[in-house]
Amino acid sequence: MIIYNETFVVEDDIHDEWLQWIKANHIPAVLDTQNFESYQMLKVLNSPNEGTTYCIQYFTDDFGKYEDFMLYHLNPLHIKHNEKFENKFVVFNTLMQEV
């Protein structure tokens, strides 16, 4: 299993709006690419960062689908996210494999 993880640290003043938007727009858009079969969203309880930290993990069994996502879909999705919440969050991505 390949797991693509997006970790977001979101400023508290936009938290509620961001959470609603990410669930209604970003996650469905990622899944609509057909590159991932499922996802889970997690709230980090012991984050050392200011604001609220979330991890969204997307799952696929096909490394080629992950590559397709990175090549064709990631930048447009992040541009939309940046336009909506500019300078109000930090994001970093990791790629993991279930062992």
Image (cartoon, rainbow, N blue to C red):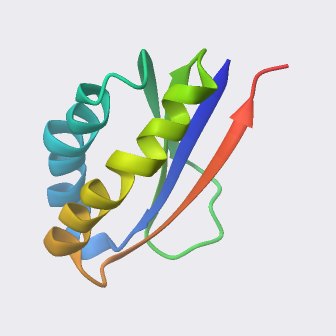
Is residue 73 shown above or below 29?
below
Q: Quadrant of residue 98?
A: top right
Q: Nearer the viewer, residue 34 or 86?
A: 34
**Residue positioned 45% across, 37% down in the render:** 68
Quadrant of the drawing holding the C terminus? top right
Position of residue 83 measured from the top left corner of the image (x, y, whole percent):
16, 73
Q: Which of 47 and 77 is in front in this view?
A: 77
Is residue 58 shown above or below 90?
above
**Residue positioned 54% across, 39% down in the render:** 67
Quadrant of the drawing holding the N terminus? top right
Report the number of numbered marks: 0
**Residue positioned 21% across, 69% down in the render:** 14
| Residue 92 as seen in the image, left or right of residue 89 | right
The residue furthest right is 99
**Residue positioned 27% across, 54% down in the render:** 77
| Residue 9 as seen in the image, left or right of residue 22 | right
